[in-house]
Amino acid sequence: MQVLGSFAIILSIFSVHSTVYFQEQFLDGDAWKTRWLDSKHKADYGEWKLTAGNFYGDAEKDKGLQTSQDARFYAASARFEPFSNEGKTLVIQFTVKHEQKIDCGGGYVKVFPSTLDQADMHGDSQYYIMFGPDICGYSTKKVHVIFNYKGKNHLIKKEVKCKDDELTHLYTLILNPNQTYEVKIDNEKVESGTLEEDWDFLPAKTIKDPEAKKPDDWDDRPKMDDAEDAKPEDWDVAENIPDPDAKKPDDWDEDMDGEWEPPVITNPEYKGEWKPKQIDNPNYKGAWIHPEIDNPEYAADSTIYKFDDISVLGLDLWQVKSGTIFDNFLVSDDVKEAEKFGAETWGVTKEPEKKMKQEEDDKKRKEEDEKNKEQATEAEEEGEEEEGEDEGEEEETPEEGTEEEEAPGKDEL
Ligand SMILES: *[C@@H]1O[C@H](CO)[C@@H](O)[C@H](O)[C@H]1NC(C)=O
C-alpha cells in the first residue's frame, strides 16, 4: 500500500487492506521506457512522447504519455503482478487530456490477463476490460465500458457521455463483487448500475412460454355490435344523383352533341354505409398476455465481475489527430484511495492547468489581433501612398497585375 505522510494513520483505520496493483505517474524521466513495452505487431505504430503538453498545472507532475503522430495506431502496455479481483472491488483510473482538439481517436485503456504477449498486442488481443473515452466526429463521444465474459466482449447498453474539451479529465471505473459498477469522471459519478441490467452477459431470465397459446374462445374485443340495433328503412339511398337544378342549355343540339344528360352530384340524403351501434362486449376478457416461463437457457452467475489473472494495462488505440496525453494510471481495490489519488494528482493541477490554458489562449488572441491590426495598418499606408487614385479601383488593380503576370506563363505552356 502506498501512503503519503500524515494520511498514514487515517488510512490505516479506514483501508487496512487496500492494495495498489499498478500506479504510473511518469515522474522518473525516461525510466518509463523500462516499464512500458511497445507492440511490434505493426511496423508503423505511432510514437509516444513524454511531455506535459502545451499547457499544464505542473511542468513535471503533468508529464504523461502523448501520442505524437497523426493518423496512427498506438500500442504500448505495462505489466504488473497478476491478481484476481475475486471478492474485492476493482478500481481502474487514469487521466486523459485531448489538448489537440481531438477530432477522432481513442482515449481508453485495456486491461489484460498475464497471458498477453505484450510485444504482439493488437486490436484483436483478448482483454478483460476496456474503459475510457472515445471520440469520433460529433456522433461518438462516449465512455466505453466493455467486459469480456466467457470469451466475448460485451458493451454497456447505456450511453455514457465523455468530456470533449482540451483539459485533463479523470476517468474512474469501479467494479464491485456484488456485481454493481460505477463510472466517475473528475471524481463525480456519471453512471452506475448492475452488470446484469446494463450489459447482456446472460440470456433473458424469462421467455414467452412456447406451450402457451391464446384459447380459441378468448374474446379480446372490448366493444361489439348492438344486436338490437336495426338499419332504418329509409337508410338506403343512392350515393350520387343527377343534379335536379341542372338544365339543358338552350343551344344544345342533340344531333351534334348527343343526348343531354344532367351532371351527377352527391346525394345530400346519402348517409353512407350503415353500421350498428357499438356496446360493451359482455364476454370481453381483456388482452391475452402470453405467459412467461423461466428461460431454461438462463443460469444466474455471480462471478461475471471476476477476472482471475489481471496483469497488464495497455493503450491500444487509433488517433487521427494526435496529441492526447495519458497519465496518473491506477489499478487498485480501494475506492477511497483512488479518489484521494485522483484528488492529489488531477485535483491539484487542474486549476493551474486551466489558468495556463486561458493565458495561452488570451496571448494567442492578442497576437492575432495585433497581426490583424498590423495588416490593416499596412493596407492603410498603401492606400495613402496611392492617394489620388480612384478608390474603387484599389482592389482590382493588384488582381489585374496578377493576371498579366500569369498570362505569358499560360502561353508558354
Ligand atoms: C454493492 O457494493 C457496493 C460497494 O461495497 C455498495 O456500495 C452497494 O451498496 C452494493 N449494492 C448492492 C445492491 O448490494
Image: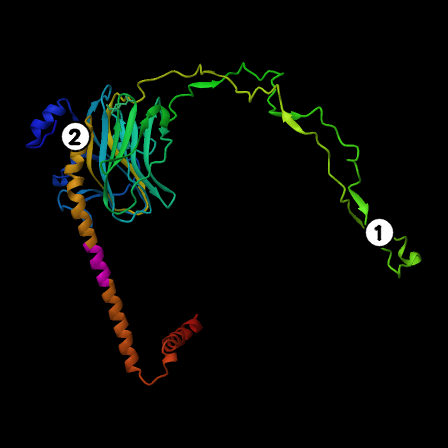
Residue 331 lies left or right of residue 219; in this view the side is: left
Q: Quick check: which quadrant has ligand 1?
A: top left
- Residue 332 position, x and y percent, is 19, 28
Q: Which-is-in-front pick, marks 2 and 1?
A: 1
Instruction: Please state, as top left, top right, bottom left or bottom right, where the C terminus lies in the image.
Output: bottom left
- Residue 108 position, x and y percent, is 28, 36
Residue 284 lies left or right of residue 261; in this view the side is: left
Q: Is residue 348 magenta?
A: no
Q: Is residue 363 magenta?
A: yes
Quarter where residue 118 is shown: top left
The amino acid type of the residue labelled 2 equals Glu
The amino acid type of the residue labelled 1 equals Pro
Quarter where residue 143 is shown: top left
The scheme the figure's colours follow is: rainbow
Looking at this rendering, what residue extends furthest in the right direction?
Answer: 255
Cβ atoms at labels 2 and 1 below 8 Å apart:
no
Residue at label 2? 337
Per the rendering, the mark at residue 262 is: 1
Q: Is residue 39 visible?
A: no
- What whole-number distance in Å separates the C-alpha atoms at marks 2 and 1? 95 Å
> From which residue to which does the magenta span run?
359-367
Q: Is residue 258 visible?
A: yes
